Amino acid sequence: MKITLFGATGMGGKAVLRKALERGHDVTLLLRPQTASGASLPQHVRVIAGDARDPDAVRAALVGGDAVIQYLGVGGMGDGKPNDLVPDATRVILDEMAQQDITRIVCASNIGVPGSGAWLFRKLLVPLAARKLIPILAAKVKMEAILRASSADWTAVRLAALNEKPDRGRVRVSAEGLTQGYTITTGDAANFVLDSIELRQFLRQTVAISN
Ligand SMILES: NC(=O)c1ccc[n+]([C@@H]2O[C@H](COP(=O)([O-])OP(=O)(O)OC[C@H]3O[C@@H](n4cnc5c(N)ncnc54)[C@H](OP(=O)(O)O)[C@@H]3O)[C@@H](O)[C@H]2O)c1
């Protein structure tokens, strides 16, 4: 398939890119200009330089594509301040997808958005020890609302905390968007996302995953 990937240089996106290429997909990346100039990437990957909120750049990145993976982030846990990069970019991507008759998109979300995650995570860990996550979760609430209001075949994958340990090959999946697990490897998450694209699973759903 021809997949456009946003966020390919992030912790999670790097694994998505690697796995997508291993599976034989034809991948186009949208990278920020300063990132594109410094990135060392496989030669056959198409790169569009631009910002994920710029309609012109997004349009160019989507041309000829079959599906989209949006793994954008604000850099780890961010700076604890409100940041609408993810919902703003998602809105632009969906608008441009509609113009080009591309329907399938899978977006990274987080466990911890209301209705997901273990009780301990939501009620103790985030408010007490990981307050920087609060604006990130708020942005994902907005992103999920934008997806629900769209006519796309979207899936929002609520990821547990990512780590770069070896794949476990076993993922706990909650189709209701809940999960009791706390972590997942970037490779297992990437495989789940790519399976969802290839098998057209979890259409118009939030789904939570962890190891
Ligand atoms: N990491 C976790 O433990 C975790 C857990 C649950 C959910 N998630 C979610 O999963 C997603 C990916 O997480 P991550 O940790 O891989 O994120 P990350 O390491 O922060 O990577 C963010 C990616 O987005 C790109 N990006 C940022 N601003 C951009 C812009 N304006 N235009 C184009 N690209 C831009 C970055 O490119 P540059 O290289 O140019 O900066 C990078 O490729 C996020 O939504 C995050 O909240 C992450």
Image (cartoon, rainbow, N blue to C red):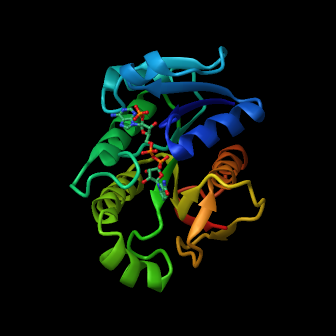
Is residue 105 visible in the rendered image? The answer is: no
Q: Is residue 137 left or right of residue 207?
A: left
Ligand 1 shows up in the quarter that is: top left
Q: Quadrant of the N terminus?
A: top right
Q: Position of residue 162 (x, y in %)?
A: 55, 57
Is residue 44 visible in the rendered image? The answer is: yes
> Which residue sits at x=43%, y=76%?
115
Which residue is nearer to you in this view: 130 or 204?
Answer: 130
Q: Is residue 191 left or right of residue 137?
A: right
Q: Quadrant of the C terminus?
A: bottom right
Q: Is residue 209 left or right of residue 94?
A: right
Q: Position of residue 168 (x, y in %)?
A: 76, 61
127 to 208, vertically: above or below: below
Q: Position of residue 127 (x, y in %)?
A: 31, 77
Q: Position of residue 52 (x, y in %)?
A: 36, 32
- Tell me where residue 25 sits by quadrant: top right
